[in-house]
């Protein structure tokens, strides 16, 4: 098990948190960042500095793209992705508010396939200059957790369990994003058992320190290998992911000692 950290806070607001993400030794699977619900209108040198430090520590850094539940125009998503690559050399993308229904899966496949092509091109892959598409194998379907070497890393931030077909589109699905009061009673549908734990991410906020063990047990039972647990809340419209939890160092120690998730 390891952490997926949606580190959306600006480096000026959360310098300590970004320094922790760049510190060697934490079991980090990835860190995502968001300038302005996307890459912003111009490069931010402060983000450039902290992203470089985290990447130098061997942690994949993902740029956040707001999919708006599947309503975001394809061209806007691609333009934002290109800016992330040009300005910050990201290793992949976190599609926040990814769609969950079967009807939107086809368009999501198109988006993921294009994002992988952009990532391969940015790392020296072949590209058809006439069509603007990648000439390699289509990895939009059946892409697994090891796809990062050729097509970057794609995380679909559904926040709930989507139609099962989405598991064939991306490296990871965020199948829970919400408060501890809901997570403690949550269950995983049967179809998730057909996939390895590396495919699933759980993001839990409002988690008291006294329930850390319980939350990690739930993640293992439901077969999620990547987690983010925080005592921060969304009370009064606050962003619970705007910084690391108060018990960050303790969760790092606990996670290192945890048995593997259920398979």
Image: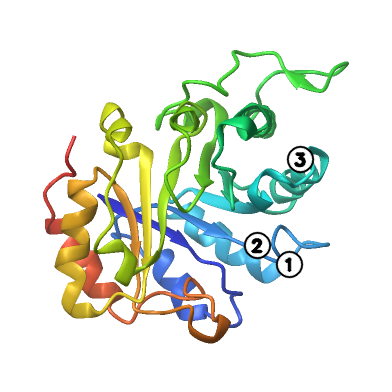
Residue at the far right in the pictured view: 130
Q: Which residue is mark 2?
A: 48
**Label disc, if present, on residue 44 of the rendered structure:** 1
Image quadrant where one finds the C terminus: top left
Residue ID at (53%, 76%) = 239
Decide: is 158 above or below 116: below
Could you say where residue 20 lies in the image, as x and y percent from the top left?
40, 71
Quick one: label 1, few (<14), some, or many (20+) residues within 10 Å? some
**Cβ–Cβ under 8 Å for marks 2 and 1:** yes
In what element is the residue under mark 3?
A: helix
Q: Mark 3 to mark 2: distance in Å?
A: 20 Å
Q: Residues within 10 Å of mark 3 (few under 14, many from 20)?
A: some
How much space separates mark 1 and mark 3, taking CA atoms?
Answer: 19 Å
Rendered location of residue 107, percent (x, y)? 68, 31
**Residue shown at 61%/65% (left/top)?**
49
| SS of the residue under disc 2 | helix
Q: Position of residue 216 (x, y in %)?
A: 20, 59
Q: Which residue is mark 3?
A: 78
């Amino acid at each position: 098990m390891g952490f997926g950290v949606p580190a959306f806070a600006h480096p000026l607001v959360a310098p300590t948190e970004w320094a922790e993400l760049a510190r060697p030794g934490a079991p980090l699977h990835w860190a995502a960042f968001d300038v302005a619900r996307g890459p912003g209108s111009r490069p931010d040198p402060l983000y450039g500095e902290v992203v470089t430090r985290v990447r130098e520590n061997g942690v994949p850094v993902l740029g956040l793209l707001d999919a708006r539940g599947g309503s975001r125009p394809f061209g806007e998503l691609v333009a934002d992705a290109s800016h992330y690559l040009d300005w910050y050399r990201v290793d992949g993308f976190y599609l926040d508010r990814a769609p969950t229904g079967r009807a939107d899966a086809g368009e999501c496949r198109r988006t993921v396939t294009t994002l992988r092509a952009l990532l391969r091109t940015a790392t020296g892959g072949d590209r058809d200059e006439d069509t603007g598409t990648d000439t390699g194998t289509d990895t939009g379907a059946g892409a697994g957790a090891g796809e990062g070497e050729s097509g970057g890393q794609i995380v679909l931030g559904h926040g709930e369990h989507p139609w099962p077909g989405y598991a064939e589109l991306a490296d990871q699905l965020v199948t829970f994003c919400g408060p501890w009061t809901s997570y403690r009673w949550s269950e995983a549908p049967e179809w998730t058992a057909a996939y390895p734990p590396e495919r699933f991410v759980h993001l839990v906020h409002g988690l008291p320190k006294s329930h850390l063990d319980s939350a990690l047990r739930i993640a293992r039972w439901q077969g999620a290998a990547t987690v983010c647990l925080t005592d921060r809340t969304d009370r009064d419209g606050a962003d619970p992911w705007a910084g690391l939890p108060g018990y960050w160092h303790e969760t790092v120690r606990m996670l290192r000692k945890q048995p593997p998730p259920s398979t």
